[in-house]
């Protein structure tokens, strides 16, 4: 029996719903085919957005969606994607496969998608190859309610009311595909861009997110915070979980992986905790009397593409191993909700660690989707400190604790989410809830399977949550967690 404790008397505060955010780039089949099929498609759609995908994302309670990139953002000129579709420029997507981008999905379409999803839009502006004027005009186009050149143009394009887009990213990966800048140079540019990112409505202030570090580049965070921290609300961080390191063309397969790679994936993803803590410490050191958040706006697994697919499309399958990666990262973000203000898994449909895969008119939900769905009760809830006894498991130098936990309290009850990372052993969990009053009910479910199990077209429900037996103990509950599983307990 392993002991876990949820302490109702200790909390780091509310879990920002945006920690459960997603990312959609003009990359492969994410936007086109995956989300947007156009009004004339045979695939059921509302204003061009796939109905099946929109409904699934709503059921998962998607809070925020980042767009249009990624690397694509720093080549994107928003004016190419407005106005009559037949007049829109056809460009080359130079980052992702050199395919033709017809710009049929632009600002109006993205904001229509967010309206249908009921989520916040998060737009990444072009700093790498754009101009201050272009970025500033985009914000005016989206947010100006009164009379102005941009507001008139928006109205002429069919949108009367401003969208009041709150979240704006000042470039993406400015250290790499976003301009190969040095942190000092980016910090100066960030100050300049931020100056002209205006508020057009005091009830809808914009939230400025600086392009942040790659993995453990602490000098980037330090320099940006020191020089530009006073003019942004958050700084981003990108960290992908890649099982093999060294050769970017040999990251390891998404399915059929070895036991060693199972554990290297888990060990690498656990590094997120150290990264969040270290970057947050630096942010706090330089934030002065303001509160600057950490926005992990790209995270997730990055494997070799599925054999036979376009290498530039980053299409990969998604197994129970990905479900554990999702559970670990979401637990980490929940437990650091005092500094992590947003996180966006990459990417929402058909790219990298997607929650949804499509094939023509068909759609399936991945194991990662089910974790987001099982964890959705954490959104906006009060985080509670939680601890679980663990043992180290693994292969060689790739070690991980066998269990990983987070907990929160809301009007719906206390939600305890636990992942069992062992691929061979179940765990008997005895969880005590302290300082949370009388307990009379526990509802539980688990997602489990072989660590390489996945959903595929023709076998869409091989991995899905099932009820899990749990018994009340007076001050908590007991349950047996299957090997390689993610469990959610809702206690009242
Ligand atoms: O998500 C794929 C790519 O990964 C993004 O375009 C970029 O920001 C990152 O390097």
Image (cartoon, grey):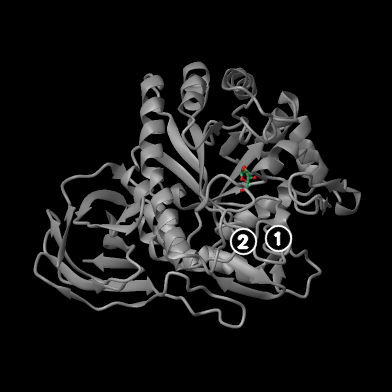
Q: Is residue 282 left or right of residue 82?
A: left
Badge 1 vs badge 2, beta-carbon distance below 8 Å: yes
User: Ligand 1, what quadrant?
Assistant: top right
Q: In this view, does 419 lie to the left or right of 74?
A: left
Q: Farthest right residue?
A: 87
Image quadrant occupied by the N terminus = bottom left
Residue in the foreground of this view, choosing between 395 and 2: 395
**Dot 1 crowding, Cα within 10 Å, few <14, some 14–19, many 20+:** many
Residue positioned 20% across, 52% down in the render = 387
Q: Is residue 364 left or right of residue 221?
A: right
**Dot 2 crowding, Cα within 10 Å, few <14, some 14–19, many 20+:** many
- Which residue is under mark 2? 349
Question: Residue 477's x, y, as percent?
Answer: 16, 69
Q: What element carries label 1?
A: loop
Above or below, comparing residue 248 to residue 254 in the picture: above
Q: Farthest left residue?
A: 474
> Dividing the picture into quarters, in which one does residue 187 lie?
top right
Residue positioned 32% across, 54% down in the render = 400
Question: Residue 23's x, y, as percent?
Answer: 58, 50
């Amino acid at each position: 029996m392993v002991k876990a404790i949820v302490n109702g008397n200790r909390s780091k505060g509310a879990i920002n719903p945006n920690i459960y955010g997603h990312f959609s780039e003009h990359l492969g089949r994410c936007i086109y085919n995956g989300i947007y099929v156009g009004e004339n498609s045979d695939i059921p759609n509302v204003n061009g957005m796939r109905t099946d995908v929109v409904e699934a994302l709503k059921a998962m309670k998607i809070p925020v969606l980042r767009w249009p990139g990624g690397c694509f953002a720093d080549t994107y000129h928003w004016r190419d994607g407005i106005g009559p579709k037949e007049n829109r420029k056809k460009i080359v997507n130079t980052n992702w496969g050199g395919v033709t981008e017809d710009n049929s999905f632009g600002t109006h379409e993205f904001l229509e998608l967010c309206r249908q999803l009921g989520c916040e839009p998060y737009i990444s502006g072009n700093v790498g190859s754009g101009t201050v004027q272009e970025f500033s005009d985009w914000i005016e186009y989206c947010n100006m309610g009164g009379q102005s050149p941009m507001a008139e143009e928006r109205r002429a394009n069919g949108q009367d009311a401003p969208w009041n887009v709150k979240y704006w990213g000042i470039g993406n990966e400015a250290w790499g595909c976003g301009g190969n800048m040095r942190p000092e140079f980016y910090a100066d540019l960030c100050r300049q861009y931020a100056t002209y990112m205006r508020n057009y409505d005091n009830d809808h202030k914009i939230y400025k997110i600086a392009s942040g570090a790659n993995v453990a580049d602490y000098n980037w965070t330090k320099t940006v915070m020191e020089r530009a921290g006073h003019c942004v609300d958050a700084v981003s961080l990108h960290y992908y979980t890649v099982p093999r390191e060294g050769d970017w063309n040999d990251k390891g397969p998404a399915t059929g992986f070895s036991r060693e790679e199972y554990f290297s994936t888990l060990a690498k993803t656990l590094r997120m905790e150290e990264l969040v803590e270290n970057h947050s410490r630096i942010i706090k050191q330089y934030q002065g009397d303001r509160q600057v958040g950490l926005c992990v706006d790209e995270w997730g697994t990055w494997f070799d593409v599925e054999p036979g697919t376009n290498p530039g499309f980053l299409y990969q399958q998604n197994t129970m191993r990905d479900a554990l990666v999702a559970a670990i990262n979401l637990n980490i973000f929940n437990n650091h909700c005092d500094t992590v203000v947003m996180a966006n898994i990459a990417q929402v449909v058909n790219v990298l660690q997607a929650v949804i895969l499509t094939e023509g008119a068909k759609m399936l939900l991945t194991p990662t989707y089910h974790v987001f769905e099982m964890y959705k009760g954490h959104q906006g809830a009060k985080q509670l400190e939680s601890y679980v006894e663990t043992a180290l498991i693994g292969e060689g130098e790739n070690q991980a604790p066998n269990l990983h936990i987070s907990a929160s309290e809301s009007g719906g009850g206390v939600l305890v989410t636990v992942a069992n990372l062992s691929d061979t052993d179940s765990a008997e969990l005895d969880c005590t809830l302290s300082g949370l009053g009388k307990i009379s009910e526990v509802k539980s479910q688990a997602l489990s399977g072989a660590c390489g199990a996945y959903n595929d077209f023709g076998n869409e429900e091989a991995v899905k949550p099932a009820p899990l037996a749990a018994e009340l103990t007076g001050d908590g509950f007991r349950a047996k967690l299957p090997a390689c599983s993610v469990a959610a307990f809702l206690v009242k």
